[in-house]
Image: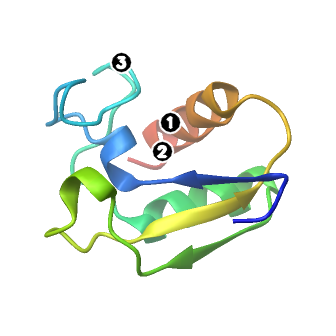
């Protein structure tokens, strides 16, 4: 990962997971079964450069959901909230 990049995993936005299982947004902002491609589409709608990779979340290494690498220099939590709101619009 380069400086100025953030990594987002689908589990951050999965409403079916608990905070302990990796969800990082409120359940009301969470999505049902988000995929890395959904996150990538939300970021592209926001005009934020990104690309997907086939790396699993370290805590969920058996799931192979992938991840999204985002060019972002501000706080990661702000990015997560922006993406979650945009995922909610899509669904």
Q: CA distance from mark 1 to mark 2?
A: 5 Å
> Relative to the observer, which residue lies in front, 54 or 48?
54
Percent of width and height locating residue 1: 69, 65
Q: Which residue is mark 1?
A: 84
> Label 2 crowding class (10 Å Cα cut-off): few <14, some 14-19, many 20+?
many
Rendering quarter of residue 41: bottom right
Which type of secondary structure does the marked residue at label 3 adopt? loop
- Residue at point 42% right, 54% down? 9
The answer, for residue 34, to whether it is visible in the render is no
Name the residue tied to disc 3.
Answer: 26
- 14 or 69, which lies in front? 69
In the picture of the structure, the residue carrying the numbered disc 2 is 87
Looking at the picture, does residue 80 appear above or below residue 35?
Answer: above
**Which residue occupies the extreme bottom position in the image?**
54
Q: Callout 3: 10 Å neighbours few (<14), some, many (20+)? A: some
User: Residue 49: which quarter of the image?
Assistant: bottom right
Q: Residue drawn at (33%, 58%), measured in percent from left and top?
A: 57
Q: Are marks 1 and 2 in contact (CB under 8 Å)?
A: yes
Residue 62 visible in the current orientation: yes
User: Which one is in front in this view, the residue at disc 3 or the one at disc 2?
Assistant: 3
Disc 1 packing (10 Å; few <14; some 14–19; many ≥20): many
């Amino acid at each position: 990962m380069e400086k100025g990049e953030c990594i987002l995993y689908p589990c951050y936005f999965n409403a079916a997971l608990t905070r302990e299982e990796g969800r990082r947004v409120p359940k009301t902002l969470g999505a049902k079964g988000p995929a890395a491609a959904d996150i990538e589409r939300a970021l592209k709608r926001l005009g934020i450069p990104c690309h997907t990779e086939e790396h699993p979340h370290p805590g969920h290494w058996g799931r192979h959901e992938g991840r999204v690498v985002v060019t972002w220099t501000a706080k990661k939590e702000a990015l997560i909230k922006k993406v979650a709101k945009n995922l909610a619009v899509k669904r």
